[in-house]
Amino acid sequence: MNCIFFFFLVFLLCLSSKVSSQNQNMFDFDDDLCYDKNSPACTRNSMDICSQAGQIISDNLILTKRISVYIAVENLGETPYYAATYSTQQPYNNPENGVVIYYPTALIKQLDPDFDYDGPDMTIQINSYYDQNILYFRDDPIEGFQVDYLELILHELQHGLGVFSFWYSELINDSDLFPDYDYEAEANDAITFYNFKQDIFDTFLVSLDNNNAQTTTYVEDLNNMAGPSSTYYNTYDDFYNELRNKQQEQGKTYTHDMLTMTTTSHKLGFLPKNGGAAIVLDTSFNPLIDGKSIIHFDDELYKTSPEFLLIPEMEPGKKLEDKIQDYENARQNYIKLAELHKNQ
């Protein structure tokens, strides 16, 4: 199952190549949630662009089961983003050292023929408040303040396929960031703790300042400190304070370190388990911003590279194909310079 996280990396690389295959489009887009009927996002043209994005991914990935995508369009007013994706997640396989791991249904169904699920795999929410900032009609020239709708949808689909984290801002308590957890609320603000949980993406996070130490081991240790499962705490504060005390007793600073890593640039990375160099994730936002922090590549490092599709804020004023061409030209120039230097 861990191989699923090579999918989006392969996809990013393939976008810069000329793929001639025409596999069956394995994405079904549903616009029943188009609440703002006046938005260009609710037109047939925009749904065709969604299908084009689905075709691009289908041509680059081996998909065996259809993926259901709801497109929700609504004027949400000013928000930190033009679009957001809500990936349907389910626990899958046995817990790892007591920690329950969640996977996106879009990818579970590709790898497990017995997986039975027929609901939406993801919902992409478009904020029509920003319609003027999005190029929906791609035959038109793009304005300097606009982003390409095709690039936007491709970006969001990657989140739906699993680039998603269970580290949330609401889990910040004082100077600590705690993992998400399953619990039952009891009377008088008491809780019964069951287990910490992670998204599969989270299991690949590493500390760049600590020899790429996996942060999932932090969560496993914290789970042992908070447990066993069904442990009762009188209040939420008791729960958090108990974890602080146990970390102090054991000489650990997991929750403090996680807050530092997720709000300081170049501290957190993504590292596939078969090795290679870690991808630097964007942790430049302080305070942490849900939907931007952690689940994107570092803007500063990757903005002008082939990995631009997964930076937190899209560069306006260029269509997707123009960016691909620009970065391909840059890559070719680099190769030429390297060859020139080699021959000197």
Image (cartoon, helix red, strand yellow):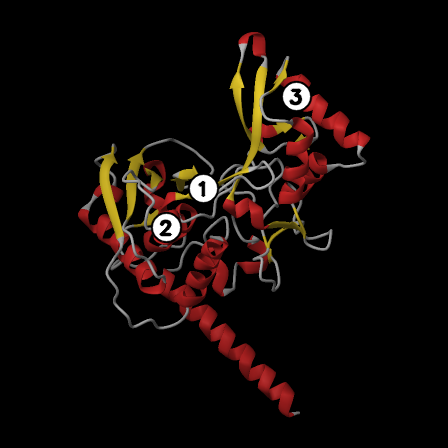
The answer to which of 117 and 271 lies nearer the viewer is 117
Q: Is residue 90 left or right of residue 58?
A: right
- Name the kind of residue labelled 1 in the image: Tyr
Classify mark 1: helix, strand or loop: loop
Sequence-wise, the earlier of marks 2 and 3 is 2
Give the label, 3 or 1, closer to the camera: 1
Which of the 4 image quarters holds residue 130?
top left
Which of the 4 image quarters holds residue 221?
top right
Which residue is at a point 62% across and 17% down the rendered structure image? 232
Residue that label 1 marks? 92
Please state the horizontal and vertical placement of residue 125, each as a whole percent of the image.
35, 38
Residue that label 2 marks? 112
Please state the horizontal and vertical placement of residue 111, each as a whole percent of the image.
38, 53
- Name the kind of residue labelled 2 in the image: Asp
Please state the horizontal and vertical placement of residue 341, each as a whole percent of the image.
64, 86
Q: Is residue 278 left or right of residue 159?
A: right
**Contact between labelled residues 1 and 2, with CB atoms less than 8 Å apart:** yes
